Amino acid sequence: MMKHFALILLLILSLLISGCFSRKNPQRSSFTVKSIISGNEIMLMNGYIVKLLGVENNASTKKKLNAWLTKEKVKFRFDTKSPLKKINRRSKDKSFYAYVLHKQECINSKLIKEKTSPVVITPYLTDSLNKYLSYNTQKKNKNPNPNFNTNKIGRTRCHSELDKLFPACDYTNSTTRNYAVNLAAKSPGSYNIAQVCNIFKEILPKWKYVNDPKGSEFYALASSTISETDLSGDCDDFAVLLYSLITSIGGTARINLERIWSTCIHRS
């Protein structure tokens, strides 16, 4: 009887131990990089895919990631706005956005500091946005736009514009998500270009252009554009809506901020 009890106890302990190891915390544990998928995605030995916050996918970033991270140990830090993630072998979702830490250095920041990547607005990019944007206005770096006013007032106004833009992209809102799913479902399966085409072909013919209030920049919530204005608004609202719909079905989208920066220049 005691022998059977000891075996049962040993089995329970082994299950508890394996359960603990299957739920590692990426912020505290080190993980080995298996391969570089793209300029802003890496694959770990355990099969998880890590998407680098704020980093663009291009040939230069992929080359740097290959040189720095392949077969190396890395850790991660999540943005305060992103959901905390546990590494679990039974999890169906094998990807997450994060800041990648290698030898106590943030790889995301390093790529942007070195001008290997511009600042890309990805989901959950909040903590480091202002810091990242400041890399583009430091005097020791070449300014990509020589006409850009880098004084304190100009930067503050631009950041204020971005602070209004981000909440408008409410791709996790049920109205936005459900609308996108209904359109994407015409081409069912994993995220694909046909789903993007379905969204674009639905929105463009129905879009009704209406100006913002005079003298101000207004960014309508994507969910509000769908449910309250019957697909109406200006160019910013159109961009916010498309970004939100594509992102809500697993796509990666980007809003071109060039017009916002030029607006800040004229107001400075």
Image: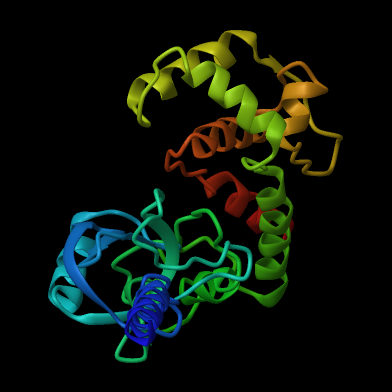
Horizontally, residue 9 falls left or right of residue 73, namely: right
Report the side of 13 relative to 238 (left or right): left
From what the image shows, is residue 111 above or below residue 94? Answer: below
Count how many numbered circles sit on residues in the image. 0
Nearest the viewer among 85 and 38 is 85
Q: In which quarter of the image is the C terminus?
A: bottom right
In this rendered view, identify the residue nearer to me: 80 or 139: 80
Q: Picture coordinates of residue 180 (x, y %)?
A: 57, 25
Q: What residue lies at 62% left-to-right and 40% top-to-bottom?
A: 171
Identify the residue shown where x is 43% and y is 85%.
28
Q: Which residue lies furthest to the top in this view?
A: 205
Q: State the image coordinates of residue 119 (x, y, percent, origin top left).
A: 45, 62
The one of 203 and 95 positioned closer to us in this rendering:
95
Q: Is residue 199 visible?
A: no
Specify the quadrant that holds the N terminus.
Answer: bottom left
* Picture quadrant of residue 8: bottom left
Return the residue nearer the eye: 7 or 247: 7
Above or below, comparing residue 107 to residue 211 in the picture: below
Residue 56 visible in the shown view: yes
Tell me which residue sits at (56%, 18%) in the image: 182
179 left or right of 30 in image? right
Colour setting: rainbow
In the image, residue 35 lies at what x, y percent?
A: 16, 63
Q: Could you say which quadrant of the image residue 11 lies in?
A: bottom left
Q: Which residue is drawn at 20% across and 67% down?
A: 45
